Amino acid sequence: MTLESLNALTIFDANEQFELCCGAANWVIKMNQNRPFQNKDDLYKKSESIWFSLSSDDWLEAFTHHPKIGNIESLRKNFHNTKSISENEQSGVNDASESTLKNLAESNQLYEDKFGFIFIVCATGKSADEMLAMIKIRLNNNVNAEMLNASKEQNKITKLRLEKLLLL
């Protein structure tokens, strides 16, 4: 899709495209309100500005639209709309050892129990071992620091998904 075609979509169709990039309803609404975008940089800058203007409740809403890192079964069952996107983003877990996957699952549960939301990481280009190391480090944070970390990672994910959208 070109930027011009994104700008020309109906609100309904643009909503569908934006929802593939980020699951926060207020982000989707505000992205639509900011169309047309002048160029790709304008799109990315507005996306980031909108994202960081949202509330933590909006961020939490976006986080619920992600499968847990390494949980491919969850990906298949619950996230069929973004399945191909998420599978590609999490391709680093495909070659992981059973031990790493088990540790990742256990760490994911510890993380969710501690912070109240799933571990969010821009997984593109990262191996399962790298993500496991990241989650273990981030488990030492307090909830405020971790909410900010997760929001920054979500912003990276959203930008990558917008870039992919414009390549379709």
Image (cartoon, grey):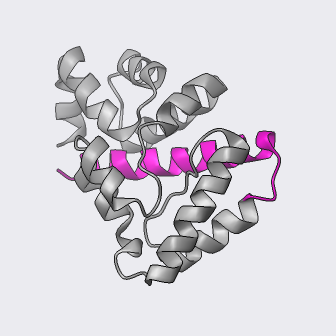
Q: Is residue 67 left or right of residue 150?
A: left
Q: Is residue 140 part of the magenta span, yes or no?
A: yes
Residue placed most toward the observer, 112 or 146 = 112
Residue placed most toward the observer, 13 or 133 = 133
Give the x, y percent position of residue 48. 54, 37
Give the x, y percent position of residue 120. 55, 51
Could you tell me if residue 54 is visible in this image? no
| 34 vs 2: above or below | above
Q: Is residue 29 part of the magenta span, yes or no?
A: no
Q: Which quadrant holds residue 96?
A: bottom left
Task: Identify the residue shown where x is 59% and y is 71%.
Answer: 132
Which span is picked out in magenta?
A: 139-168
Name the main secondary structure of what is drawn in magenta: helix
Could you tell me if residue 69 is visible in this image? yes
Q: Is residue 164 left or right of residue 111?
A: left
Considering the image in quadrants, where does the N terminus appear? top left
Task: Identify the residue shown where x is 25% and y is 38%.
Answer: 3
| 83 vs 60: above or below | below
Residue placed most toward the observer, 148 or 1 = 148
Give the x, y percent position of residue 100. 52, 78
How many numbered marks have been drawn onto this rendered protein structure? Answer: 0
| 96 vs 140: above or below | below
Give the x, y percent position of residue 148. 71, 42
| 144 vs 103: above or below | above
Q: Which quadrant holds residue 6?
A: top left
Task: Identify the residue shown where x is 65% and y is 67%.
Answer: 134
Task: Identify the residue shown where x is 36% and y is 32%.
Answer: 38
Q: Is residue 90 left or right of residue 9?
A: right
